[in-house]
C-alpha cells in the first residue's frame, strides 16, 4: 500500500513539474516580443541618460562635451523662438545667460521617454549678477520652469521643442510688464 501511495505521489509530482515547465517555455513569438520590448526599454533608458548628461555638461560649463550629444542637423524650436537654434546658437544662448547669471543651473525634475522621444521638466535657477536687457541685478534668486521635448536619432539629440515660463522669469528680474495700448486702426476700412 505504501509503495502504491509513493508511486501515485511521485507520478503526481512529476505531472506538476512537467506542467510547470511547459508554462515556462516561451514561444518564438513571445521571445521576439520580449526582445523588442527589452530593446525599447534600453533605448529609452539610454536616451534619458543622455538628456541628463547634457544638463550635467551645461552645469559644468563643458560645452565641448555637451556638443558630443547632438546630431549635426540639430534644431531647437518653440512657440516663442522666431528662429530655430542650432547647437552653435544654443550654446551661445546659454553662454549669454551664464554671463548674466554666473551660477545658473539646470535641475531635471522629471523625465518620461517613449521610443525616440524624451520629455523633460526642468527647473532653472540662479542669481542675476549683471544687467539683463537693461535691468540691473537685484541679487535675488531667479527661477524658471521649462519643458523640453527631445527627439533622438542614432543616439543623438536631433530636435527639441521647448516651452519656458518667460513671463514669470521677466517678472522676477523686475521687468515692468504693461498692456499694449489698443490699436484704433485695426478693423477699420
Image (cartoon, rainbow, N blue to C red):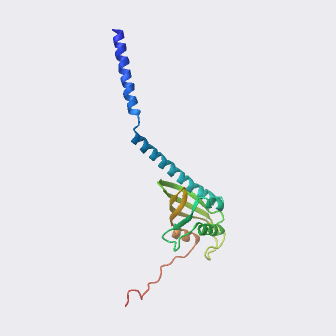
* Quadrant where the image shows the N terminus: top left
Vertical placement of residue 90 versus 22, above or below:
below
Residue that appears at 58% across and 72% down: 174
- Residue 19 x, y percent position in the rendering: 36, 28
Q: Nearer the viewer, residue 62 or 174?
A: 62
Quarter the C terminus occupies: bottom left
Name the side, left or right, on which 119 lies relative to 52. left
Q: Residue furthest bottom?
A: 189
Residue furthest toward the top? 1
Residue 99 vs 157, above or below: the answer is below
Q: In the picture provided, is 3 more to the left or to the right than 41?
A: left
Q: Residue at x 47, y 49 (%)?
A: 40
Q: Is residue 185 above or below residue 44?
A: below
Residue 6 percent across, percent down from the top left: 37, 13
Camera sees residue 61: no
Count how many numbered circles sit on residues in the image.
0
Quick check: 141 above or below 114? below
x 46%, y 54%: residue: 115
Query: Where residue 81 appears, x then y in whole percent?
Result: 52, 72
x then y, percent, for residue 25: 41, 34
Which quadrant of the figure has residue 24? top left
Q: Nearer the viewer, residue 77 or 35?
A: 35
Tell me the residue at 61%/75% (across/down): 135
- Specify whether residue 96 is in view: yes
Q: Quarter of the image holding residue 7?
A: top left
Left or right of residue 165: residue 33: left
Amino acid at each position: 500500500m505504501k509503495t502504491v501511495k509513493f508511486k501515485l505521489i511521485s507520478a503526481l509530482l512529476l505531472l506538476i513539474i512537467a506542467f510547470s515547465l511547459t508554462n515556462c517555455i516561451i514561444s518564438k513569438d513571445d521571445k521576439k516580443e520580449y526582445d523588442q520590448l527589452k530593446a525599447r526599454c534600453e533605448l529609452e533608458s539610454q536616451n534619458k541618460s543622455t538628456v541628463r548628461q547634457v544638463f550635467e555638461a551645461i552645469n559644468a560649463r563643458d560645452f565641448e562635451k555637451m556638443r558630443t550629444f547632438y546630431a549635426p542637423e540639430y534644431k531647437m524650436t518653440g512657440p516663442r523662438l522666431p528662429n530655430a537654434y542650432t547647437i552653435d546658437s544654443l550654446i551661445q544662448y546659454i553662454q549669454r545667460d551664464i554671463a548674466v547669471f554666473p551660477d545658473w543651473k539646470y535641475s531635471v525634475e522629471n523625465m518620461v521617454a517613449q521610443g525616440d522621444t524624451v520629455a523633460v521638466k526642468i527647473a532653472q535657477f540662479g542669481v542675476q549678477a549683471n544687467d539683463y536687457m537693461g535691468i540691473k541685478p537685484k541679487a535675488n534668486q531667479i527661477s524658471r520652469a521649462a519643458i523640453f521635448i527631445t527627439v533622438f536619432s542614432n543616439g543623438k539629440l536631433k530636435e527639441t521643442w521647448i516651452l519656458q515660463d518667460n513671463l514669470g522669469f521677466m517678472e522676477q528680474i523686475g521687468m515692468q510688464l504693461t498692456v499694449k495700448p489698443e490699436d484704433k486702426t485695426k478693423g477699420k476700412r
